[in-house]
Amino acid sequence: MILLLGIFIGVLFLTYFATKKMATLNKKMAFNKNMQVVEVLQLAQGRYLFIVKVGKQYHLLGAGKESVNYCTLLDENKLNLEVPEQKHFHEYLSYFVKGKEGNDHDEK
């Protein structure tokens, strides 16, 4: 029984490290200096709007299952490019442990 538990834990660790290695490889492959997808909006199943930064300009693209269409050049000054603050997992976990909901409403 102890041997099976040891093998199970070993497989879990190997899976964790293999997944982490694959994620770093994918991140390196996806890195591009000149093009970046800034935002994606799903309009319907299989239909999306993309804001893409090419060089220093922002472009709006529409994409379906079988096509990609150029829509327009966007004015950078009219875009809200602020990145929302990301919470860490332990912050969400502390809400559940304390019995609180994951929102910022004040209790009255």
Image (cartoon, grey):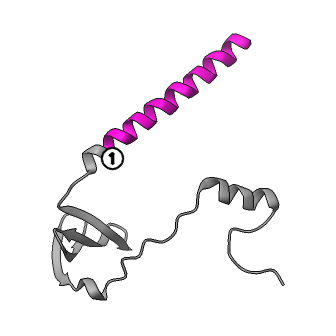
Q: Position of residue 58 (x, y in %)?
A: 21, 76
Element type at mark 1 = helix
Magenta stretch secondary structure, dominant? helix
- From this viewpoint, is residue 16 visible? yes
Name, please, the residue furthest toward the bottom: 78
Asked if the magenta segment contains residue 50, the reply would be: no
Magenta region includes residue 10: yes
Give the residue type that dot 1 points to: Lys
Residue 56: which quarter of the image?
A: bottom left
Residue drawn at the location 78% of the way across and 67% of the way down: 100
Crowding at mark 1 (Cα within 10 Å: few <14, some 14-19, many 20+): few
Give the quadrant of residue 21.
Answer: top left
Residue 65 appears in the rendering: no
Vertical position of residue 10 compared to residue 16: above or below: above
x and y percentages locating residue 51 in the rendered image: 27, 73
Magenta-colored span: 1-27
Which residue is nearer to you in this view: 6 or 105? Answer: 105
Q: Residue at 28%, 65% (x, y): give it.
A: 37
As drawn, 105 above or below 50 = below
Q: Which residue is mark 1?
A: 27
* Residue at the spot 39% in from the left edge and 41% down from the top edge: 23
Residue displayed at 73% across by 13% down = 2
Frontmost residue, 69 versus 2: 2
The part of the image, by quadrant, that contains residue 55 is bottom left
